[in-house]
Amino acid sequence: MTARLMQGNEAVGWGALAAGCRFYAGYPITPSTEIAEMLSRELPKLGGKFIQMEDEIASLAACIGASVGGLKALTATSGPGFSLMQEHIGYAAMVEVPCVIVDVQRLGPSTGQPTSPSQGDVMQARWGAHGDHPIIALSPTSVRQAFDLTVQAFNFSEQYRTPVILLLDEVIAHMREKVELPAPDAVRVVDREITRVPSEWYLPYGDALSDVPPMASFGMGYRYHVTGLFHDPAGYPTQRLDEIGPWIERVFRKIERNLADIVLVEEDGTDAANTIVVAYGATARSAQHAVKLARGQRAKVGLVTLLTIWPFAEEVIERVAHMARRIVVPEMNLGQLALEVERIAGRRKVVRVNRANGEMVTPMMILEAIEGK
Amino acid sequence: MKHKDRDKRTEIRLAGEGGQGMILAGIILAEAAAIYDGKNAVQTQSYGPEARGGTSKSEVVISEEAIDYPKVISADILVATSQEACDKYTGLMARGGLLIVDKDQVGRVLVHQAVRAPISRLAAEVVGQPITANVVALGVLVGLSGVVSREAIEKAVLARAPRGTEEINRAALAVGFAEAARIAGG
C-alpha cells in the first residue's frame, strides 16, 4: 500500500479486516462512528456481515453469537455504549468466546462531551463487568498502531478465548496521520484452535492440555451448551465447588502464564533515568514531546509507553521504580492508571499530571512535572 | 524555556464556524504536505456536536521528522474565518506568526500585522460559489506562506473535489493565489 493520510478509526477498520474479522454489529456513537461507516462499506465486499443493532447490549450479544458461529467479530462504541456492553463483556469472559470491543473514549460521565477526548474508561475496561474475570485491554498511540493493535487484539482474543478491549481516545480515533499499511500477507494472524476430536467426545470447556480449550463452531455438528452460569467441562450448569474453583483459576491462569506475550510496552531511555514518564494513548504523544524537551535540558528522563493497559505491566513498573526517583503519570482523567503505578511504585514516588476538561495533556504540563515544578 | 522545536515543526490552525469547511481545509493541507510533498503531517480537529455553527477548528502539524505531539502548541499560521475564532486564537500564536483573516467575517483584529483578505467575497463574487471559500483560503495561505508547494496543494484539492467540481475548485485556488500575490506585492 502507498502512503495515505488516514484516520485512527479507519485504521481500526483496516486492522480488523486484516485480522480476519468478518462480522460487525454495533450502534453508532461519536467518536467511534467512522469504524462502523468504514466496515459497513468494506465488510460486504469480503463476504462479511455488518448489522446495525438496536443498542449496544444487543450489539455485543450479536458479536458473541457470530463468534460462537466461527466468525471473528468486532463492535465499536464510546463511553455510554461501553457501559451498556459490560453485561456481555462479563458473559464473553464467562463463556470464553473471542471478540473485540473498541471503546473510543470521550469526555464523561454520561453524555458528557461527545466530541472531546478522554482516558476516563481505563478502570471501567478492567472492572466494568461484575465478578472476577481476566481482561486484556490495548491502547494505541498512533494511527499506524491503531491498525497494529487491532490485529493484535483479534490475535489475543483468538489465542486466549477471551474478550479483548481496544481503548482509543478521541484524539487517536479522529487524528489523521501519514501511514503506510502492511500488505495483507505481511500481517501475522492467529486463528482459534478448533477441536479435532469427534463430536461425541468433545468437551467445550475441558479437553485442553493447555489452559485454552479448543473450540467447535456452531454448525460444525457439535452440540454443546453455552451459559453464563458456572459450567462443567461439558458446558452444563454446575454448583460443584471442585468445578467452579478450578474454572476461575484456569481463566486467570491462561492470561497470567502468558504475560510476557500479552503485556506490550515500549521503553525509551529507561535504563539510565532518574525520572520516568509512564504514558499511554494520545497522552504518550505529549509525553514524547516533553521527554525530548527535557533531554534538551540534560534531564535524565525515560519514557515507558504502555500499549497493553490490562493486564497491568507490573514487572516493568517495578523495575523502573527501583531506579527512578520520580515517576510522572500523565492522563486525560483525574488519575486512573496512576493508581496502578502507585500500587507498584508507592505513592510517594508518583507525580500525577491530570486533565479532564476535553483537552489533551500538554507537553508543558508534563515537562513541569519532570522538572519538579 | 523553549516550548517546541520551532525549526522542526510548522503548526497551522484553521478556525471558524462549523460548516465553513475549515476541517476539510485542514485535511487537504495535511494531504498536500504528507502525500504530495512527501513530508510528515498530522491533522486534528475540534468541533461541537452541532452540524453547523459553533466554533470549529482544524490543526495541522507539518514536519520533515516524525511528529510526536499532534496538536498546535503555538500556531505559526492562523487562518480565522469568524470573529469568535479570531478573538479566541490570535493570542495563542507564535511570535512573528502569520495571521490571515477573512475580512468580510472578521471586523476586529487585535494585532497590527494581520493579513486581511476578502476570502468569502472572492469565493462568492469572483469564483461564483460561496462554498469554495475554504479553498480560496488555502490559496491565500499557501501563496503567502509556502508551507506546502503550489503543485501539492493543487493536487490535494483536486483529489478531494467531488467529481464535476474540479474546475471550480481549481479556479478557487487560483483566486486565492492571486490574492496572495496582490497582498505580497503590497
Image (cartoon, grey):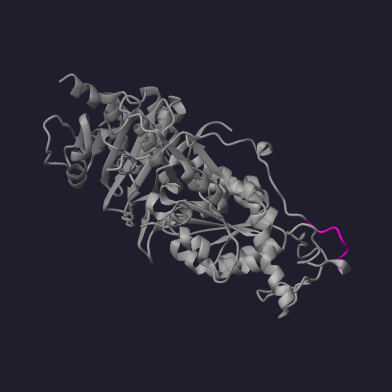
Residue B166 shows in the view: no
* Chain part drawn in magenta: A194-199
Residue B64 located left or right of residue A260? left
Q: Which residue is drawn at the image coordinates 32% and 24% (left, top)?
A: B7
Location of residue A254 by image quarter? bottom right
Of residues B156 and A245, the one nearer the viewer is A245
Q: Which residue is drawn at the image coordinates 37% and 62% (left, top)?
A: A108
Q: How many marks?
A: 0
Relative to A232, say whether A20 is above or below: above
Name, please, the residue furthest toward the bottom: A239
Of residues A50 and B157, the one nearer the viewer is A50
Quarter of the picture containing the N terminus of chain A is: top right
Q: Which residue is drawn at the image coordinates 54% and 68% (left, top)?
A: A129
Name, please, the residue furthest toward the top: B185
Task: Tell me the chief SS of the magenta region.
Answer: loop
The x and y percentages for residue B31 are: 42, 33
Relative to A243, say whether A304 is above or below: above
Quarter of the picture containing the C terminus of chain A is: top left
Q: Is residue B118 magenta?
A: no
Relative to A337, say whether B121 is above or below: above
The x and y percentages for residue A205 are: 76, 67
Residue A335 shows in the view: yes
The x and y percentages for residue A133 are: 60, 65
Of residues B162 and A19, the one nearer the viewer is A19
